[in-house]
C-alpha cells in the first residue's frame, strides 16, 4: 500500500478508505456511475452483500445489489439495462458453476454487442488458512478449474484475474472502458477470495474520467466515395439493416438517406432501424438488385443471393465479421465505421453524383415504392381483418393487438415467433432477440424496466422461449425490485423451429411426425398464467380472438398497479 511503504501514489490516482479488498472494488464500481450489480451469490462473492449494505448505511455512493435467482437471467437483465442506457452494469456470478449456468446468455450478449462487466469469484488459492479468505468448505476444492475464464473466452472481449487489491481500481476502470468501447461486448473478471478478503486501511482509486471508452472509427472517405458512386449508378439498389438501431440517432440519418435517394430499406427488426410504416420500407428481393448496402448486419441473406454482377457495400464496425469464424459473404466495399456517423457523410457524397437523368430515376423509383407500399398496407389490413376472426388464435392478431396498445412510451422486446415492431415505436424502444438462443426477452425486459421505470415494457416469446427464460426467477426479481413488465406467451405447444426443420428434412409424414413430433412437442403445456399468479403477478390465458383486447387492458392495468403480467395466448 502507498501509505505503508511510503511510496507516492501513482499518477491520476487518489487514496480511498476501505477495510477489505471487496470494498475497494465496490468503490471503483460506484465511482464509474454503475447503478446495478446483478447478483448471484455464493461462498466466493458474499463479501459484496456486506460492502453494499455498509456503503448504504454510511451514505457512501454504491450501486444497488439486485438479487437474481438464476445466472442467465442476471446476464440478460444487465443486457437489457445496457441496451436502453448504453452504460455497462455489473454482474456478479458464483465461480465456475455460476459462469456456466449463465448458459446461452453469453452468446446473446456477445453477438448483440452488449457491454456488461461480469465478475465471478475464483476459488481460494490458499488451503491452510495462510491468508484471510482461504479455503474453508469442501466445495472450494471442487470449484477450482485450470482456466475459469476459458469457459467463456469465445464470448467475451477481454478477461483478467485480479491478483492483488492494489490495482483493483485500475482493473475495474479497464473492464468498464473495454466493455463500453465499440464494438461493445461483455468482459469477464475473476476475483479470488483472498483478494476480496484482504485487510486494508486505504486503497488506490482511479478517476473514471481518465479512462473513457475509445471513440468509434470514422469511415474512410475514399471508401465512402466509392459507395456513393455505386449507389447513385444503381437502378435497383436495396439497403439491408439489422444492428444499426442500437444507436437511436442513426435512424433519422437512414430515413433521410432513403427518402432523398428513393432507396428501399429491408430491416431485420432486432432494433428499431426504420419506421414500420414508411413508403421506402421494402423486401429484399435480392436476385433483382444491382447494388446492396449492408448496414450492421451479420447475416445479410440466406438462400437466393444477389446476382453475380451486383456490388455489395458493408458499413459496420466489423464489416467482414471477424468475430464469426466462417462468414463467407462477398463484400466489394467493406467500410469500417460507426454507421450513425457515416450515413450523413454518405448522403452528402451521393448528392455530388446526381445528374438530371439520375434525378428522374429517383422520382420513378419513389413512385414504384409508394405503389408497392400502398399494396402492402392493403394486404396487411385484409390479413388483420381475417386474423381478428380466426380460431385458433392467430399470431398476427396477437401482434396487431399489441401494436394497438403500444405508443411512443412503449418498449418492445421479443424472441422467436412473437410480436413485432409497432407502427409508433420510436428509435431506442425495440430490442429483439439477436442470436440463436431462446429465452432472453423476458429477463431483458426486467432490465429495461429497471433502467427506464417510466416506460411501459412488453416482451414476448414462444412457449419454448418462455421455459428457457426461467420464469420463476424473472417473476421473483421483477416483483422484488418493482420492475413490472408484461410478457406474452405465443403458445403453439412445440419448438416451432425444430418441427419445421424436421418437416423440411423428411416431411410431416415421416416416423417422427406420425409419432407426434417427440423432441419438438411441448404438450401438455404448462399453465403459464398460474405460474405468474403464484409469484404475485397477473396471469390470464387467452384462447379466442375476441378475448385478447380485454385481456391486454387488464394486463396493462396490472402494470400500473405495480404488478407484472403474463398473457398465455394459445395459438394452436
Image (tube, helix red, strand yellow):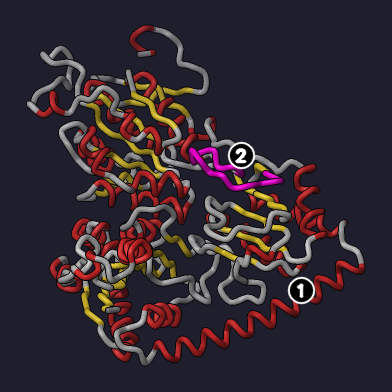
Q: Secondary structure at mark 1?
A: helix
**Residue ID at (27%, 58%):** 469
> Residue 515 versus residue 155: which sits nearer the camera?
515
Q: Position of residue 100 (x, y in %)?
A: 25, 39
In the image, is residue 180 part of the stretch drawn in magenta?
no
The earlier-in-sequence mark between 1 and 2 is: 2
- Residues at circles 1 and 2 in contact by the CB criterion of under 8 Å: no
Residue, disc 2 = 215
> Residue extending furthest left?
138
Q: Position of residue 220 (x, y in %)?
A: 74, 41
Q: In the figure, residue 231 lies in which quadrant?
A: bottom right
> Residue 462 versus residue 172: which sits nearer the camera?
462
The label on residue 487 is: none
Residue, disc 1 = 365
Q: Secondary structure at mark 2?
A: loop
Q: In the figure, residue 93 lies in which quadrant?
A: top left
Looking at the rendered image, the quarter that the C terminus falls into is: bottom left
404 is higher (above) or lower (below) than 70: below
> Residue 5 versus residue 132: which sits nearer the camera?
132
349 to the left or right of 71: right
Q: Position of residue 494 (x, y in %)?
A: 26, 67
Q: Residues within 10 Å of mark 2 (few under 14, many from 20)?
A: few
**Residue ID at (45%, 47%):** 111
> Residue extending furthest right?
356
Read off the magenta span.
Answer: 319-334
Amino acid at each position: 500500500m502507498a501509505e505503508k511503504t511510503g511510496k507516492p501514489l501513482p499518477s491520476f490516482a487518489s487514496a480511498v478508505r476501505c477495510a477489505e479488498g471487496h470494498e475497494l472494488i465496490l468503490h471503483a464500481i460506484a465511482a464509474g456511475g454503475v447503478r446495478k450489480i446483478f447478483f448471484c451469490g455464493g461462498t466466493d462473492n458474499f463479501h459484496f452483500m456486506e460492502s453494499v449494505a455498509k456503503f448504504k448505511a454510511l451514505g457512501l455512493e454504491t450501486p444497488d445489489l439486485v438479487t437474481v435467482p438464476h445466472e442467465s437471467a442476471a446476464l440478460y437483465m444487465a443486457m437489457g439495462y445496457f441496451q436502453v442506457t448504453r452504460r455497462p452494469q455489473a454482474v456478479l456470478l458464483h465461480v465456475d458453476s455460476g459462469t456456466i449456468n449463465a448458459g446461452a446468455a453469453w452468446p446473446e450478449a456477445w453477438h448483440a454487442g452488449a457491454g456488461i462487466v461480469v465478475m465471478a469469484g475464483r476459488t481460494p488459492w490458499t488451503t491452510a488458512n495462510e491468508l484471510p479468505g482461504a479455503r474453508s468448505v469442501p466445495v472450494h476444492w471442487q470449484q477450482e478449474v485450470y482456466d475459469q475464464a476459458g469457459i467463456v473466452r469465445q464470448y467475451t472481449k477481454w478477461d483478467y484475474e485480479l491478483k492483488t487489491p492494489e490495482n483493483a481500481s485500475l482493473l475495474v476502470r479497464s473492464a468498464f472502458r473495454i466493455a463500453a468501447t465499440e464494438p461493445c461486448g461483455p468482459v469477464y473478471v475473476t476475483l479470488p477470495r483472498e483478494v476480496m478478503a484482504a485487510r486494508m486501511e486505504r486503497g488506490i482509486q482511479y478517476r473514471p474520467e481518465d479512462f473513457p471508452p475509445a471513440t468509434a472509427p470514422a469511415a474512410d472517405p475514399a471508401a465512402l466515395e466509392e459507395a456513393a458512386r455505386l449507389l447513385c449508378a444503381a437502378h435497383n439498389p436495396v439497403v439491408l439493416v439489422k444492428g444499426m438501431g442500437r444507436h437511436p440517432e442513426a435512424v433519422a440519418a437512414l430515413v433521410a438517406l432513403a427518402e432523398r435517394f428513393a432507396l428501399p430499406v429491408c430491416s431485420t427488426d432486432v432494433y428499431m432501424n426504420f419506421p414500420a410504416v414508411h413508403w421506402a420500407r421494402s423486401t429484399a428481393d435480392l436476385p433483382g438488385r444491382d447494388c446492396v448496402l449492408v448496414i450492421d448486419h451479420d447475416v445479410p441473406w440466406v438462400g437466393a443471393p444477389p446476382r453475380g454482377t451486383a456490388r455489395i457495400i458493408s458499413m459496420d464496425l466489423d464489416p467482414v465479421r471477424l468475430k464469426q469464424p466462417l462468414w463467407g459473404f462477398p463484400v466489394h466495399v467493406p467500410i469500417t465505421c460507426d454507421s450513425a456517423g457515416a450515413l450523413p457523410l454518405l448522403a452528402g457524397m451521393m448528392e455530388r453524383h446526381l445528374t438530371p437523368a439520375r434525378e428522374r430515376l429517383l422520382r420513378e423509383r419513389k413512385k414504384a415504392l409508394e405503389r408497392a407500399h400502398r399494396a402492402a398496407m392493403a394486404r396487411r389490413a385484409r390479413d388483420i381483418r381475417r386474423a381478428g376472426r380466426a380460431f385458433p388464435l392467430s399470431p398476427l392478431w396477437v401482434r396487431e393487438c399489441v401494436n394497438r396498445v403500444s405508443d411512443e412510451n412503449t418498449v418492445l422486446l421479443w424472441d422467436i415467433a412473437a410480436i413485432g415492431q409497432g407502427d409508433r415505436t420510436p428509435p431506442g424502444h425495440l430490442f429483439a432477440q439477436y442470436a440463436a438462443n431462446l429465452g432472453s426477452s423476458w429477463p431483458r425486459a426486467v432490465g429495461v424496466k429497471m433502467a427506464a421505470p417510466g416506460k411501459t415494457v412488453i416482451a414476448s416469446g414462444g412457449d419454448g422461449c418462455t421455459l428457457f427464460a426461467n420464469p420463476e426467477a424473472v417473476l421473483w426479481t421483477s416483483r422484488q425490485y418493482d420492475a413490472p413488465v408484461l410478457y406474452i406467451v405465443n403458445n403453439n405447444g412445440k419448438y416451432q423451429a425444430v418441427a419445421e426443420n424436421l418437416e423440411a428434412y423428411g416431411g410431416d409424414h415421416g416416423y417422427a411426425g406420425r409419432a407426434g413430433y417427440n423432441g419438438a412437442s411441448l404438450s401438455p403445456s404448462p399453465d403459464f398464467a398460474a405460474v405468474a399468479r403464484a409469484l404475485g403477478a397477473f396471469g390470464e390465458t387467452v384462447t379466442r380472438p375476441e378475448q385478447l383486447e380485454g385481456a391486454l387492458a387488464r394486463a396493462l392495468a396490472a402494470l400500473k398497479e405495480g404488478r407484472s403480467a403474463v398473457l398465455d395466448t394459445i395459438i394452436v
